[in-house]
Image (tube, rainbow, N blue to C red):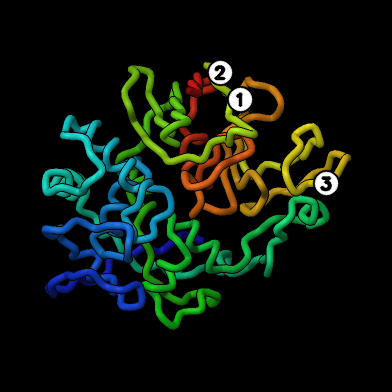
Amino acid sequence: MTRLLIPLLLSSSLVAPVLAAELKPDAVNNAELRKRPPGEAKTDPVAIKAQVLLDRAHFSPGEIDGRFGDNAQKALAAFAASKGLKTGARLTPELWTALTAQDQEPVIVTYKITKQDVKGPFLQKPPRHMEDMKDLPALGYASPREGLAEKFHMSEDLLAALNPGKTFDKADDEIAVTNVVKADEKNKQKLPQITRLDVNKDEGTVQAFDKDNKLVAFFPATVGSEEKPTPTGTFKTISSDENPTYRYNPDYEFKGVKSEKPFTIKPGPNNPVGSYWIGLSVGNGYGIHGTAEPSKVGKSESHGCVRMTNWDVRIVGDHLKRHAEVDLH
């Protein structure tokens, strides 16, 4: 069923910082930068608008949560550099103008929930331990709300704040969502083919370049810990798989996994590697993949792979040249 996206009516009211419980769609669509730029302390319409505009420009802030934290700041700095503007993580009037001038589509729109959105099956409580996942028929979403939040690159809290009283489990119900998919649906701002990925392990970022070595996209990422570090070097991509099956090898020696025998976990967005896998020519199962916990991207450590949000790694995979170069440093 085709998704229905309808711009919401705008209000001429003045916009001020609000709590998540008070969020109004028109306040976000009309948001204008104030003297004090948005921060990470509380949800802010300006932060939501900036995050959506960055996402649509392919400078991903990761999960859109309305709080202008590290991932949003990194994306803004990369966006500024791509425009030849003064780099920095602070949302200045110059950067705000650059963001809003290039894309004037509404950032919050109405979406009609489809039967597919609420069909399931859903995992009421996804297992916390990897070994407990191996007998499940699929690793689907925990709820329709989780699936809808991921579809629109949002946190569940932000989705709930924009839709007070909504249960998200009724087909044909209309809800307010971030307008992150509309640009690609209209073939605007479509990415060229990605021929090289640059993964900066210290900064927790992935930069995508085209055949002319032009930066075309930017994403936050989680990389390995000191115990399970991400490899260093230049490699090639060897596979791109949607809805991958996860195979655990005891040689990985992950903390908390006691099994001495290999086991397999079925596909799904709550699979340990999320809903997309890009294999690398490193050996020992290293790759770039999605995650069941988008809020932790760039804020935690992996078992050595490069972890991104499910939607970001899918964008990379969908535009990736075969055997593209990947620099890990």
- Establish if 1 lies above or below 103: below
**Disc nearer the start of the sequence (2/1):** 2
Q: Nearer the viewer, residue 289 or 37?
A: 37
Local crowd size for mark 3, using a 10 Å CA cut-off: few (<14), some (14–19), many (≥20): few
Task: Please provide percent x and percent y for residue 133.
Answer: 76, 54
Mark 2 to mark 1 CA distance (whole Å): 7 Å
Residue drawn 66% across and 47% down? 272
Task: Please provide percent x and percent y for residue 228.
Answer: 64, 33
Task: Please provide percent x and percent y for residue 122.
Answer: 67, 66
Q: Secondary structure at mark 3?
A: loop
Marks 2 and 1: CB-CB under 8 Å?
yes
Residue that mark 3 sits on: 258
Residue that mark 1 sits on: 280
**Disc nearer the start of the sequence (3/2):** 2
Mark 3 to mark 2 CA distance (whole Å): 31 Å
Residue drawn 26% across and 64% down? 45
